[in-house]
Amino acid sequence: MKKTTCLACQGQDASFFTQKNGCDVFLCRECGLIFVWPVPENHFALYEEDYFSGAKNELGYADYESDREILGGTFKKYLKKTEAILPRKGKLLDVGAATGHFLELARKNGWEASGIEISKYAAKKARKKGLEIAVGDFENHEFSENCFDAVTFWDVLEHFGKPDLAFKQARKILRTGGILAINTPDSRSVLARIFGKRWHAIVPPNHLNLFNCDNLKAVLEKNGFEVMKISRVGKKFSLQTVFKVLANWQENPVSRKISNYFLKSRMGRINFYLNLRDNIFLIARKK
Ligand SMILES: [Zn+2]
């Protein structure tokens, strides 16, 4: 059986879990991290136009730009929870800012917000709205040190090939007492346990790691953070997204047909709030 070192706890008991989309997925028997190894070299190439409009790419968003309203509800909730911990609004960096929905909201709420985004396509869209956004990978980008009050990882931690580097970078650029706010799928949620290898969040090479509450807290503490809040929150979903997830999960032509129908139909835009309890929300403070 293939084995490798765990990316979160550095334990030696991570063994082969499943293979999907040409990637080997491992599960750490010590801390429960699910991760892709080796990290595919060209995985950044995923995040071009297709990823955000989803016509061809089954891994990405149905239509990120017009999901604005749906995402907006989730982002409002995240921002409110962040401000409850850090009421003083200062400099904020949104990592994986995409087309800038969260940046717009944060600015409206009085933050001096900027972003970084791997996709040139998405960053260009954000800039057209007058938003400040850098293009590149967060882990290796040159930022001023100790200068941000808040760094946000919304739906982004699971995309890092080497999450440890992202935590180190966040620590470096935050001022002491500044916060890192994260949401990410929970690999120890009931849903993840029921679906096992078919859990909808196991979608390499899009998702490269899947944490749980315990190992995420441990890895942050190891990197000089103190966890202030950890909970599981729901998200708003559109019918398009739900049927796309089902189709990817079931892997049969009938559910793919249904999914394609909802992608094209206005009905697919119907959205609702759902707490599947498999989405971790965490706020940590730089010590
Ligand atoms: Zn581990």
Image (tube, rainbow, N blue to C red):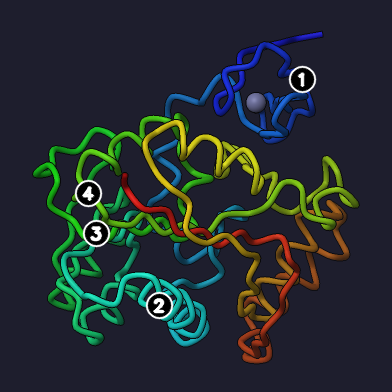
Which residue is identified by label 2?
Answer: 84
Element type at mark 3? strand
Q: Secondary structure at mark 2?
A: helix
Q: Is residue 99 left or right of residue 241?
A: left
The 10 Å Cα crowd at callout 3, few under 14, some 14 to 19, many 20 or more, is many
Q: Secondary structure at mark 1?
A: strand
User: Could you tell which of marks 1 and 2 lies nearer the N-terminus?
Assistant: 1
The residue identified by callout 1 is 16
Ligand 1 closer than 8 Å to the CB at disc 4?
A: no
Closer to the camera, 286 or 18?
A: 286
Q: What's the CA distance linking mark 3 and mark 2?
A: 18 Å
- Report the Cα–Cα distance between label 1 and label 4: 39 Å
Amino acid type indicated by mark 4: Thr
Q: Amino acid at mark 1?
A: Phe
Is 253 on the left or on the right of 122, as rendered? right
Question: What residue is shown with label 4?
Answer: 176
Camera-nearest label, 3 or 2:
2
Q: Earlier in the sequence, mark 4 or mark 3?
A: 3
Q: Position of residue 136 (x, y in %)?
A: 24, 43
Q: Which residue is mark 3?
A: 93
Q: Which kind of residue does numbered mark 3 sit on?
A: Leu
User: How many angstroms separate mark 3 from mark 1 (CA)?
Assistant: 35 Å
Return the x and y of residue 244 as percentages of the image width and height: 71, 65
Rendered residue at 18%/56% (across/down)? 148
